[in-house]
Image (cartoon, rainbow, N blue to C red):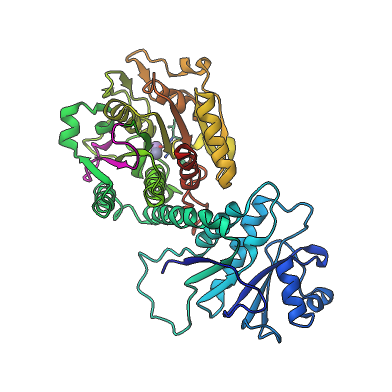
Amino acid sequence: MTLQFSLASAAPETAETPCVVVGVYENGLLTSAAARVDSAAGGAIKRQVESGDISGKAGSTTVLFAPEGMHAKRVLVVGLGSQKSFDAARFQKVCMEATRALTRLPIDSAVSFLADVEVPGRDSAWRLRTAALAADHAAYRYTATFKPREKSSQPELTSITFASDEQARTGLDQAIAIAEGVRFARELANLPPNICNPAYIADQAVQFAESNEKVSCTVLDHEEMDQLGFGSLLAVGRGSANHPKLIALEYIGGASDEKPYALVGKGITFDTGGISLKPGPGMEEMKFDMGGAAGVLGAFIAAVKMGLKINLVCVVPAVENMPDGNSYRPSDVLTSLSGITIEVLNTDAEGRLILCDALTYTAQTFQPKAMIDAATLTGACVIALGKHASGLMSKHDDLAAELLSAGETTLDRAWRLPLWDDYQTQLDSGFADIANIGGKNAGAITAGCFLSRFTEGQRWAHLDIAGTAWDEGRKGLATGRPVPLLAQWLIDRAG
Ligand code: BES
Ligand code: MN
Ligand code: ZN
């Protein structure tokens, strides 16, 4: 069940709903909505603040049941922390915690006043969009591969109405489209690799194109790619019974003769490392190695759903990296689609090998205005930036600035790493034009440098999302990043 969102002008004390959501700061400071509830309900909130039952601690939640003087059956009081330090990130966190609390109650809908809370430097459209996206994120459940549970008789949360001004409506419209893209990306990435293989991703793309008039999809199979000379991409897939696919989605939202923007995503549906086999522990996480593909597909869906007046292409090389008698090996020399030859020194550095051909194909086929790739490319990027920022690499300062700013706006942040020529020599090879690994130093950057060799003359940027695409641990789920960042970048381009 996906959450429905709506916008209404409502008063907290008269809203007819199973639950009203309001915020209180630390030190007993009430938001205006909370103050209205408090006075309608005869001081019900202040009493609990005084008793210490409501602390106002950021993300804490308290439910008041059947408060007198209120039309709503419940009030969910959410802690906002101290007002002095209240900021965009806190706002997002608080909206998520509120939704988590709502999903635990036996209710199907709620009216939230959180989008009304002032956030320094952000307008009401931003607040509404962020609140809705945070709610959708918190309400997401992965259920695809569990035994179907018996339907409980308890109601489930299906809709949230936000009280906000009408000017904020664009924020809600954007949130609904972006949430669909994020959900798509999370679901695809969470699926196990025995279901989500290259053919499955291609099917998903074809299905999306069939349901949208302005979208078309082409899928190249391994034989067609062989004819065209995708020597690098096909080498990576040679060890797998699941043949590679190259997926290209096209959306015409602008003038038909306008050049498109291009998104390219790494779609390794499982990365064993190949002959340079990865260690066993943690290998299951490599089902998320198609997180870049999921992310660019999600952003593409969001752009189409928003009806952005731009042209956009989304190219996904979908490949499985397996060890086998037919696998490519360390010391193989590959001829890429661009003609550049590559010495394979490690079959686990496979992402760049499928991306280089996909980037060449995208540049040649579409001559894009700008080309962004997203990839779970290197463990080194996780070491450098942890799980909070995606690594951004580009030789184009203006393009980098656009992407950093889209990341700040959406709190889906990236941090730039240099692509100076100084690093390029680490990729020197004695047997081919370039080696596929650059040694132990600056692994995220040398991976970016590798891709830069295949994007000369293009306005291109690379996002290494190895740390940000999924949450750590046994129950770690795909995050849907960088869908918000990319969707915002496209919104900004559409002007
Ligand atoms: N998919 C991995 C990168 C990765 C590792 C993402 C851990 C998230 C968590 C990629 O294909 C890979 O194996 N990269 C190697 C490159 C090395 C062989 C130069 C890595 O990072 O170890
Ligand atoms: Mn690998
Ligand atoms: Zn990989």
Query: Where on the picture, by quarter, is residue 311?
Result: top left
User: Magenta segment, which residues?
Assistant: 236-257
Relative to 325, is 485 on the left or the right? right
Tell me what residue is drawn at x 53 percent, y 54 percent.
171
The x and y percentages for residue 240 are 24, 42
Task: State the image coordinates of residue 259 (x, y, percent, origin top left).
Answer: 34, 30
* Quadrant of the displayed image that contains ligand 1: top left
Q: Is residue 319 visible?
A: no
Choose top left, top right, bottom left or bottom right for residue 36.
Answer: bottom right
Q: Is residue 286 left or right of residue 9?
A: left
- At a point 46% along the width and 51% down the height, the residue shown is 480
Q: Which residue is drawn at 30% across and 18% down?
A: 340
Q: Is residue 178 magenta?
A: no
Q: Nearer the viewer, residue 17 or 429?
A: 17
Decide: is 278 above or below 176.
above
Toward which corner of the image does residue 163 lie, by quadrant?
A: bottom right
The extreme front residue here reads 166
Residue 489, how many percent across, how many down?
A: 49, 39
